Each structure stands twice: as C-alpha cells, then as structure tokens.
Image: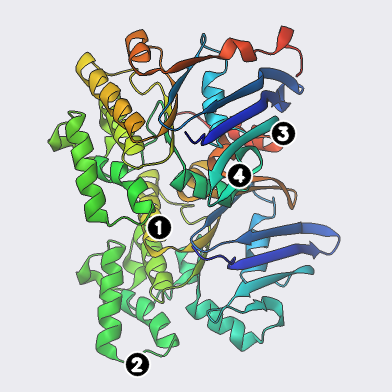
Amino acid sequence: MSDMPLLRVNAVSKFYGSRIGCQNVSFELWPGEVLAVVGESGSGKTTLLDCLATRLAPSTGSVEYRMRDGQFRDLYRMSEAERRFLMRTDWGFVHQNPADGLRMTVSAGANVGERLMAVGDRHYGNIRAAAADWLGRVEIAADRIDDQPRAFSGGMRQRLQIARNLVTNPRLVFMDEPTGGLDVSVQARLLDLLRGLVSDLGLAAIVVTHDLAVARLLSHRMMVMKDGRIVETGLTDRVLDDPQAPYTQLLVSSILQV
Amino acid sequence: MPTPLVVSDVAKSFTMHLRDGVRLPVVANVSFSIKSGECAVLGGPSGAGKSSILKMVYGNYAVDNGQIIVPYRDKLIDVAGADPRTMIGIRRDMIGYVSQFLRTVPRVSALDVVAEPLVARGVDRTDARHKAAALLTELNLPERLWSLPPATFSGGEQQRVNIARGFITDHPILLLDEPTASLDLQNRDVVVSMIQRKKDEGIAMLGIFHDQDVREAVADRIIDVTAFAVPNGAAA
C-alpha cells in the first residue's frame, strides 16, 4: 500500500434547487481499499457516487485524485478531455444496468477491446488476445467472443461489463449496485468474482449498494448515508456488528435472517 | 518479556436506539495486559462480557472509553480510537483472531480460506497453500475436503478450518474465541499442542475456553471477567 491516498473528497455537497442530494461529505480513499456506501433509496448515495466520478458537478466542495505521476489534481478543474481520458483509462465505472455500460450491438470482444483502443492500442491481435483473456477471467466461454451482449443473460452481461472496465488496469473502480437486479445465485458468483479480482489487482473501489450482505463481502470499510448525510463510518464488520447510529441500527436489524 | 497488549479502564455498553435508547452496560474498568509467550484466559459465566472484550481488542466492537494499546510500526496505537485503515493494518500484521464460527464465502475452497491471511501479507500463493495443507493435515481434516468451500462442512470441520486460518500467520497477538467448542478429544489435543507451540514462539494469546480440561492445559492465568461487571447495571 502506498503512503498517499488515491482520492481526497472535501466537503462535497450537491443541491437540486432547495433539495439536498448529498451534504458535506469528506473522506479519503487509499490504494487497495474498498469502500461501501450504503443507505436506502433516496439517501444520496448515487448522487455522491456521480459527484465523485465526474458524472455530476457538485454544488460545493472538491474532489482530488492522485494521478499516476503522483500529483493531486482537482477533478473539477481539469479540462473535459482530461477527465474523459481518466474515465477511460485509470478509472472504471460499473453500472447497475449493464446496458448503460456496454455497447449492446457490438461483439463481446469489441466491447472489451474498445477500451484498449481508447488508450492507444492498435494491434488487432493483441487486442483480441487481451479481450479473450479477460472474457476467461470473468468466466465467459471463449466461443462467445463474437456474440453481441444482447444475446447474453443478465449475469453474463454484468461480467462482460466488469471485463470491459478492468482491461485497462484501472486504479479506481466505481460500482453502482453491481449485483442489483440479478438472481441470488448469479449474485453470489458475481460477488465472488469481484472479490477475487479486487484483491488480486489491488484495486481501490467505491461500491454503492443498499444490500448490507454485499457490503460485508466486498468492502473493508463502510459509510452509511441518510437524507444526503453520512450518519456513520467505520470498519465494515464494526459498523455491521456494533452499529452506533440509530439509523444504522435500524438498517442492520431489518436484515432478514435466512 | 515484551507486553504487546495493554488494556486499561475499558468500558462497553450497548445503546439500543430502537428500544427508546435503553442502555445495556456490558463491562467497565477492564484492565489487564498480556506478555509475549503468555496465554491468558477470560473466565466467568456466559453473558459476563468475555466475547465483547475479545471483539473490542479486535476492533470489531466500538469502545465507550479506555484504551487498548498495541505496538504497530514503531508506534503505540490505541485500537479504541484507531481509524479503519490503521485497524486493517493491525489485523493484517499484529492481531489474529479465531472466531467461534466461520463466516464462509461462496466458492472459495477450504485450502484458500486458510491460506488467505498469508496471501494478504504478500506470501506467494503456492507457499501459503503448502503451509495451509500442513495445518489442515495436523488438524486431521480429510484431504478430500480441502478443495471444497467449507459452507457445507460440519461444525467441527468448519472450526478446524477456522483454527488453521487463525494459526497460519505469526501475528504477535492471537485472540481465541472458544476454538475447541465443537471438536472431539483427539483434535482438542492437537489444538492444545498448537497453542503450546505459539507460546514457545512468543505469541501473546487471549482466549475463551469453556472446556475445563483445555483451559487447565493452556492457561497461564485466568482473568476473572466478573470483576469488570458494572455495579447494579448502572451506567458506568
């Protein structure tokens, strides 16, 4: 682990008119760290994620990212082109709905290869080999490389989206409900895959989820949000096993035992 | 003899916000320290707060007040106030924990569950698996189970996986929450000899053992947890 954070978030707020999206959020994320942001619908967790991933400009506050040269840059003072380049290379974004993160009418191999071409790879053989390698790592059979994701199941589409995001060796991945909408058995497989990839690659990740079991399995630490504010933070197992805030206690006690 | 764990004046209570903020005191004025090579056992009836003390030392439970001091990277760190990143490092390098029950992850084999704490410290995966295999052999877990995820194992089999996982590293502090509860006699003896070996290596251990024979075999000292009871259940 490096001795500098990868991301510094300072007092980020987002207002929609007089309504609060998220308010006064500050934290640091370190290399290799997985942070879960949990809360119910409307708690502001997706607004926060979008503010961090430069998909939505915050009303106030700053988000700084440590570039590969070691310099911190304020994301909202970069040019649009620089931000896009970062999104395509050093970052990944895994959407809840794979159709939002994939191109549904080009082949699986092209979906993965496209990200490589965006960082300047032009050798067709290399690109195809890297795509095939990544499809294997996310457990998609080699003979599906020329199929379009339209023909894939939901779980396969999600795994393809993950391959597309990780092929450029990003250092930071944002995930918005990565297992939402999948069958439980498909979820388990995906979670296990994500858990392995995140630890093998030493990725830093911010995972937004309303599912505390997903947070327990994937994250090192956790932030609980309610009404746009952070109500509790800490080690994931501490927050879940000894919740302090009234709202966290309510969330944890509402989990159905199987 | 170095003293890697010093607990002083620690108090713990639970505030149940969903029950009108009722406060349940657990322990207060918890003070003790453990030397390298020593195995101290928390004694007292169920509900006295033994597991809560272990969980506070591991950072799994929050601490109301007091200090839990552990040396880490040439500094003394108070676990009670450590930030999550420091605590993750302390768990990786300083404090190991054998919990009562194994929390299984789907699709990860028993061998990899055991090897994981070494891999997390940067040990080569093949070497870590070799060491895991040796421990599972010592604990008499049949080899045909090693490649399977432990979710479907019996209680005793899961516990042995858990013990192997906790003992595979050389964490200077090792917390043991009833590691022998569901083991047969033969495997209980194996665990007793593994604890003895940890003592010889200078590991400081803090444990809970309900089994009297095991307790007598491993304990250098009993820490009576009833001495930390909160008077009349009043707020500490």
User: Mark 2 belongs to which subunit?
Assistant: A
The lab-note entry on whether marks 3 and 4 share a chain reads no
Distance between the alpha carbons at the discs numbered 3 and 4: 29 Å
A200 or B128: nearer the viewer:
B128
B74 or A33: nearer the viewer:
B74
* Image quadrant where residue B210 sits: top left
A43 or B42: nearer the viewer:
B42
Q: Amino acid at mark 3?
A: Pro
The lab-note entry on whether marks 3 and 2 share a chain reads yes
Q: Nearer the viewer, mark 3 or mark 4?
A: 4
Distance between the alpha carbons at the discs numbered 2 and 4: 51 Å
Secondary structure of the residue carrying tag 1 is helix
- Whether tag 3 and tag 2 are in contact, CB under 8 A, the answer is no
Q: Which residue is mark 2?
A: A122
Q: Amino acid at mark 2?
A: Arg
Q: Nearer the viewer, mark 1 or mark 2?
A: 1
Secondary structure of the residue carrying tag 3 is helix
The lab-note entry on whether marks 2 and 4 share a chain reads no
User: Mark 3 belongs to which subunit?
Assistant: A
* Image quadrant where residue B80 sits: top right
Q: Which residue is mark 4?
A: B77
Nearer-N-terminus badge (1/3): 1
Q: Position of residue B192 (x, y in %)?
A: 29, 21
Q: Which residue is mark 1?
A: A199
Distance between the alpha carbons at the discs numbered 1 and 3: 32 Å
Q: Nearer the viewer, mark 1 or mark 4?
A: 4
